[in-house]
Image (cartoon, rainbow, N blue to C red):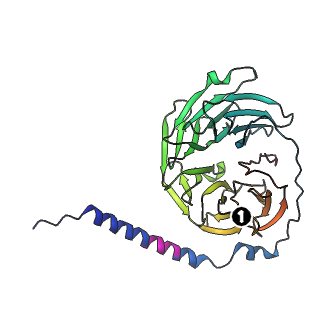
């Protein structure tokens, strides 16, 4: 007797039901391990006290909102990209502009310094990630040396080099992340799993392995294996778009900032959220998060003051002045300076 063929819709419905069942069981197992909150464990830890943040330099030159910036590993130079379509390389100490490139489109949403300091990458609404080699000749036409490395089907939201100048990781509004070879422009690995635009990513510290974390408009933070292209962990506790993610210095945790006006800390070993940082008076989204070098302080930026938090206690330890417009990306170099 011939077996009756199963309708594709029935198969899909069955798989969806099985997926939801497994998800529920996973949440139940997580709940069993949720015996105490992080701030309760840290009640006996001495508070850090108040920090005083000081402006060291102001870099002026962009004609519109700065959307992204990245420090060079020499702890001196910065690359920034702006809504005005320009990418500028700065000497942060002297405030001089060392290089400037006008991109073919406005809204250059992503930029990154190569580990060697010999190149920068950038992209945005052109859907591309372009790499520009840098030289000592500040009058050199960088546009003539442009190399298009990555091509997405929607805007480029973030990019970062891996631990060498030879590979670059990108995220896009097309809902994917991708790993590219810089020399050939070949796609080495693609990462599918977000249900909407991917807005941010961060590479794990080199000693912790080949992983990175991404966040997006689907309210998810996904941790990926660079080698297999598989999503190995997913966290879904935010209530709105995730604008920024940043690994803890040890690589065992990461922080996220969202349009729901909260920063959250996730422990990868516990496979769960361990802290929420928020303030009732702050109702606007968090656009950027970062950690201090020691990991004792985390930083969140919204349209209200730049707030420093002690991750263990979830308490604010310092505020910078209130800004008039929604700020964008902020970064911390290996010398402890904030950009």
Q: Is residue 41 left or right of residue 162?
A: right
Q: Is residue 323 a member of the stretch shown in magenta?
A: no
Residue 219, compared with residue 132, is above or below; it is below
Q: Is residue 22 a member of the stretch shown in magenta?
A: yes
- The residue under the point 61% across, 50% down is 201
Residue 18, compared with residue 329, is above or below; it is below
Q: Is residue 234 left or right of residue 90?
A: left
The residue carrying mark 1 is: 283
Q: Is residue 203 left or right of residue 181?
A: right
**Where residue 56 appears, x then y in whole percent?**
88, 44
- The residue under the point 75% across, 39% down is 73
**Where residue 27 appears, x then y in whole percent?**
52, 73
Q: Residue furthest left?
A: 1
The one nearer the camera, 58 or 76, is 58
**Where residue 7 appears, x then y in whole percent?**
24, 63
Numbered disc 1: secondary structure = loop
Write down the region rendered in magenta. 21-27
What crowding class fits label 1: few (fewer than 14 Cα within 10 Å), some (14-19), or many (20 or more)?
A: some
Tell me the quadrant of the picture where the C terminus can be found.
top right
**Where residue 261 appears, x then y in whole percent?**
69, 63
Q: Dividing the picture into quarters, in which one does residue 85 lie?
A: top right
Look at the image and tell me whether residue 323 can be seen: yes
**Is most of the magenta stretch helix, strand or loop?**
helix
- The residue under the point 79% across, 30% down is 97
Look at the image and tell me whether residue 228 can be seen: no
């Amino acid at each position: 007797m011939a077996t009756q063929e199963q309708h594709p819709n029935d198969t899909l419905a069955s798989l969806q039901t099985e997926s939801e069942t497994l998800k529920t069981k996973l949440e139940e197992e997580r709940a069993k391990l949720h015996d105490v909150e992080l701030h309760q464990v840290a009640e006996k830890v001495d508070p850090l006290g108040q920090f005083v943040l000081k402006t060291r330099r102001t870099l002026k030159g962009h004609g519109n909102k700065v959307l992204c910036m990245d420090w060079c590993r020499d702890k001196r130079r910065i690359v920034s990209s702006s809504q005005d379509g320009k990418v500028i390389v700065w000497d942060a100490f002297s405030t001089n502009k060392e290089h400037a490139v006008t991109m073919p489109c406005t809204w250059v949403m992503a930029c990154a310094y190569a580990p060697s300091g010999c190149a920068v990458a950038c992209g945005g609404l052109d859907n591309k990630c372009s790499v520009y080699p840098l030289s000592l000749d500040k009058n050199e036409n960088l546009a003539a040396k442009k190399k298009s490395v990555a091509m997405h089907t929607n805007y480029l939201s973030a990019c970062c080099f891996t631990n060498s100048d030879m590979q670059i990781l990108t995220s896009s509004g097309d809902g994917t992340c991708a790993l590219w070879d810089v020399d050939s422009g070949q796609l080495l690995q693609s990462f599918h799993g977000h249900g909407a635009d991917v807005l941010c990513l961060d590479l794990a510290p080199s000693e912790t392995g080949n992983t990175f974390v991404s966040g997006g408009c689907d309210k998810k933070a996904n941790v990926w294996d660079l080698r297999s292209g598989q999503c190995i962990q997913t966290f879904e506790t935010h209530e709105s778009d995730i604008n920024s993610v940043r690994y803890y210095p040890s690589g065992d945790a990461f922080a996220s900032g969202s349009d729901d006006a909260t920063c959250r800390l996730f422990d990868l070993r516990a496979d769960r959220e361990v802290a929420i940082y928020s303030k009732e008076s702050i109702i606007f989204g968090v656009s950027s998060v970062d950690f201090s070098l020691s990991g004792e302080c985390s930083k969140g930026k919204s349209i209200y003051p730049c707030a420093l938090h002690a991750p263990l206690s979830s308490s604010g330890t310092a505020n910078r002045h209130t800004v008039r417009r929604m700020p964008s990306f902020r970064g911390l170099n290996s010398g402890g300076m904030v950009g």
